[in-house]
Amino acid sequence: QATLVSVQVVLPSQWTASNPSSGVQTRFVQAGDVVELIDFYITPPANNPGGGDPNAPGILSGVVFEDVNGNGTRGGNEGGASGITVYIDADNDGVFDAGETSTVTSLLGSYVFVNVPPGAHTIRVLVPTAFVQTFPGNGTGRTVNLGGGGSFSNLNFGIQGQEQLDYGDLPAS
């Protein structure tokens, strides 16, 4: 006999459910069913430099996108870049050093750092070979001053592929 069950996402502090907006999905199930592909979309708090507990950790997030036309702005046809390493450059030297906090972008190009201590932080990407960073500028990081319990959610980066494909069907010039 089928039973209606509700699955609810547990939101981090100050985050909101965006799809479904209720944060709840319901399914009919029977004993022994395996339920898969229940997706929830959640939105981090808007840019909020902090102001609560001065020692509370915060959140830094954004997207790395494939800037196909290289104009430094994400267009509607420019998807996220998956598998890109994003790191907090603790000493702001432009080099990913051992011990620096890092993450890898999702299939949609998004990344998030949680439990980030208050203070100034520079976020950078490791640009893959045959790519250049188009936003905010090649080799440039995104620097924020995070207050206690604060969040920044639009720390985005653009990258553009520079590879030249040779299909071998033309004579060498």
Image (spheres, rainbow, N blue to C red):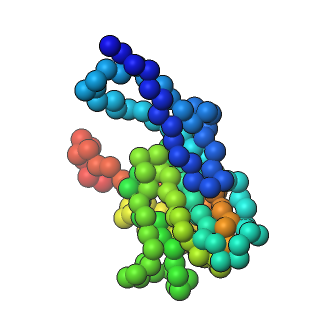
Q: How many marks?
A: 0
Quadrant assignment, res 126: bottom left
Quadrant assignment, res 3: top left
The residue lying furthest to the top in this view is 1
- Measured from the top left, where is residue 114 in percent x and y? 53, 64
The answer to whether 115 is drawn above or below residue 9 in the figure is below
Split into 4 quadrants, where in the image is the N terminus?
top left
Residue 142 seen in the figure? no
- Measured from the top left, where is residue 159 in percent x and y? 50, 57
Say which residue appears at 48% left-offset and 25% top-offset. 26
Nearer to me, 126 or 102 = 102
Say which residue appears at 66% left-offset and 62% top-offset. 152
Say which residue appears at 71% left-offset and 76% top-offset. 54
Horizontal side of residue 144 vs 89, given as left or right: right
Say which residue appears at 56% left-offset and 71% top-offset. 116
Split into 4 quadrants, where in the image is the C terminus?
bottom left
Nearer to me, 8 or 31 = 31
Nearer to me, 19 or 9 = 9
- Measured from the top left, where is residue 133 in percent x and y? 52, 63
The answer to whether 109 is drawn above or below residue 114 in the figure is above
The residue lying furthest to the right in this view is 51
- Measured from the top left, where is residue 141 in percent x and y? 58, 72
Residue 10 seen in the figure? yes
Quadrant assignment, res 24: top right
